[in-house]
Amino acid sequence: MRRHADQVDVPGTRQTYRRAVGVDDATWDRGRGWALAQAINALPYYVDTNPVMADTARHTLRAVLD
């Protein structure tokens, strides 16, 4: 599965990853939108049944909105 940098972000690596993949701003923004949509849907779905997935969604939301 392909993942957006905001879902696997380690402090200080997002810009390095972005340079390495070499995508334009529009593509990067679409990826951020995809990650945001996934997290918005996952958080309420998993909040009571799968704490790991809920935490991943929270992390993604913080990273995308940062």
Image (tube, helix red, strand yellow):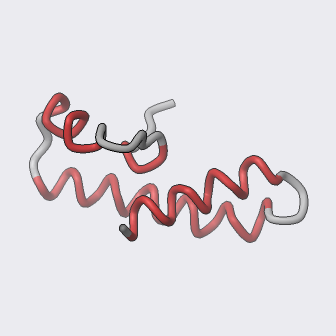
Q: Is residue 29 left or right of residue 55?
A: left
- Quadrant position of residue 16: top left
Q: Is residue 36 left or right of residue 28?
A: right
Q: What residue do we see at 37% from left, 63% from top?
A: 33
- Quadrant position of residue 46: bottom right
Eyeballing the image, is 2 above or below 26?
above
Q: What residue do we see at 67% from left, 61% from top?
A: 42
Q: Quadrant of the C terminus?
A: bottom left
Q: What residue do we see at 48% from left, 46% from top?
A: 7
State the image coordinates of residue 44 (x, y, percent, origin top left). 74, 71
State the image coordinates of residue 47 (x, y, percent, origin top left). 80, 65
Q: Is residue 20 left or right of residue 41?
A: left
Q: What residue do we see at 14% from left, 41% from top?
A: 23
Q: Nearer the viewer, residue 20 or 38?
A: 20
State the image coordinates of residue 56 (x, y, percent, origin top left). 63, 51
* The residue positioned farthest toward the right in the image shown: 49
Q: How many marks?
A: 0
Eyeballing the image, is 7 above or below 36?
above
Q: Is residue 61 left or right of residue 9?
A: right
State the image coordinates of residue 21 (x, y, percent, origin top left). 19, 31
Q: Nearer the viewer, residue 35 or 20?
A: 20
* The residue positioned farthest toward the front in the image shown: 11
